[in-house]
Amino acid sequence: MNNDDVSQTPGGSGPPPPPPPGGYYQPPFVPPPRQRGSRLWIIPVVLVGLLVLVVLMIGLGLFLASLPGFEELTYGRHIALIRVDGVITAGRSESGLFSGPYCGSEDVVEQLERARKNKDVGAVVLRINSPGGSPAGSEEVYNEIMRVRKDKPVYASMADVAASGAYYIASASNRIYADSSTLTGSIGVIWDVADMSGLYKKIGFNQQVIKSGKFKDIGSPNRPLTPEERALLQAIVMETYDRFVNAVAKGRDLPVSEVKKIADGRVLTGTQAMKAKLVDSIGGMRDTIKAAAQAAGIKGEPKVVEYKRRRSIYDIFGTQTDRAVSDAERALGKHVIERLLGNEGVWPGPK
């Protein structure tokens, strides 16, 4: 075979074939280069993946930060520090963007229970900074403190405020420390019932109520309380008040009659509360910890471990979502009220 018999192809190495007779030349077919598939879709996938990774890392960090310190799991005698911070509620603790913290009784009880069961805990110190709150939530914490007291001493340290339900909690402690300017006391019960019937009449608002019994809408803002309804609510308030007074008398080892002399809702400073036997000593948290360590027989500088709420990742993201929804609802409500009242904040009257 000679070179003239070799078929020349576009990818061959020889010269192109000569043009056919007549002068017309048909160029050889060259296939277009293969197009590579577009890979721009990789960019959003990578970005989404990075975003998910960042969210997971933040969630994991919050989760680990919420766990009790590893010190709690180690051996060695220590003081358990538990905080009661914010308005007391019966349930879980939470905090909103436009509201202060809420101290859930379930969280405090759980922390007290862990401290009670931990044999390395020599004593418990409660750091209280709360104006009070739910009677039911305060009673739950009070009862758990009484259980802890059977095994180890519980000392209370009052911060700026430890009043009403917060004092209810503190009264269960073995000893109470307060700063001289601490606001405490406020032993009593209050139940506010709003009567907005005058405003509703002014703006032309009318609500029809369908109820199963005559007391089902007790406390409705659409109308004033009837004498019978007022008597029912007053009975509930007084029953709760008696339970409050008896709890303070038991916790402070005082006669009920002596507690009732100051259980009229008055607020006392730390100095006044000590004179009234509601507080044992004037001092800060360091003084309280030192005294609790001595009561527990801990020598030297006491080791203090703060007991915190144990939360799951679901709790963290669920709380953040609920908070965002609540804040959005408040913003929407504010917008609606402003639209109703007009720019000057005055109701223009029914149209």
Image: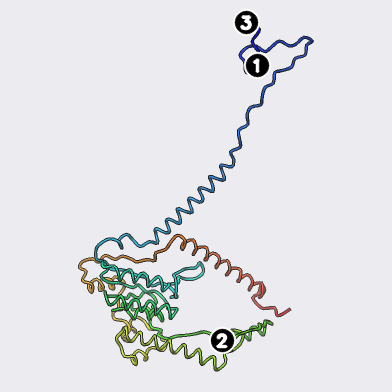
User: Is 331 on the left or on the right of 147, as rendered?
Assistant: right
Spot the residue most to the front: 1
Crowding near pointer 1: few (<14 within 10 Å), some, many (20+)? some
Q: Which of the two residues, 111 or 195, is positioned nearer the viewer here?
A: 111
- The amino acid beneath tag 2 is Ile
User: Is 153 on the left or on the right of 57, as rendered?
Assistant: left
Label at residue 2: 3
Residue at position x 56%, y 42% from top?
42
Question: Based on the displayed image, in which of its 4 quarters is residue 310 positioned?
Answer: bottom left
Question: Based on the displayed image, in which of its 4 quarters is residue 6 positioned?
Answer: top right
- Residue that mark 2 sits on: 218
Residue at position x 63%, y 84% from top?
210
- Coordinates of residue 177 in the picture (x, y in percent): 31, 77
- The amino acid beneath tag 1 is Thr
- Coordinates of residue 288 in the picture (x, y in percent): 28, 73
The mark that comes first in sequence, 2 or 1, is 1
Label at residue 9: 1
The answer to whether mark 2 and mark 1 are in CB contact below 8 A is no
The mark that comes first in sequence, 3 or 1, is 3
Of the 4 image quadrants, the one containing the N terminus is top right
Spot the residue most to the top: 2
- Coordinates of residue 340 in the picture (x, y in percent): 67, 74
